[in-house]
Image: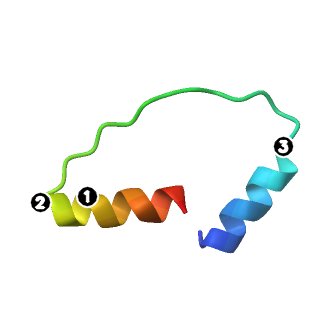
Amino acid sequence: MGLQGKARDQEERGNMSRIKGSIELEFPNEEIAKIVYESVLF
């Protein structure tokens, strides 16, 4: 699912209550972790 699909899903579910959670991921190095982290946030 591309970013446009994610944005559309969030709009459709905007009236649902928020769910907090955590996900733990391991990456081979810090540079890859930074790229993935920033792509998820933005």
The image shows residue 31 at horizontal and vertical percentages of 19, 65
Circle number at residue 29: 2
Q: Nearer the viewer, residue 17 or 38?
A: 38
The residue to which callout 3 is attached is 14
- In three-dimensional space, the C-alpha distance between marks 3 and 1, rounded to whole angstroms, equals 29 Å
The image shows residue 1 at horizontal and vertical percentages of 59, 69
Comes first in the chain, label 3 or label 1: 3
Q: Amino acid at mark 2?
A: Asn
Q: Nearer the viewer, residue 4 or 30?
A: 30
Q: Position of 15 compared to 1: left or right?
A: right
Q: Amino acid at mark 3?
A: Gly
Circle number at residue 33: 1
Q: Does residue 11 lie above or below 2 as drawn?
A: above
Tell me the quarter of the image containing the C terminus: bottom right
Q: Nearer the viewer, residue 10 or 31?
A: 31
Q: Residue 14's quadrant in the figure?
A: top right
Comes first in the chain, label 3 or label 2: 3
Q: Position of 23 compared to 31: left or right?
A: right
Residue beneath the point at 67% across and 61% down: 6
Q: Amino acid at mark 1?
A: Ala
Q: Nearer the viewer, residue 33 or 12?
A: 33
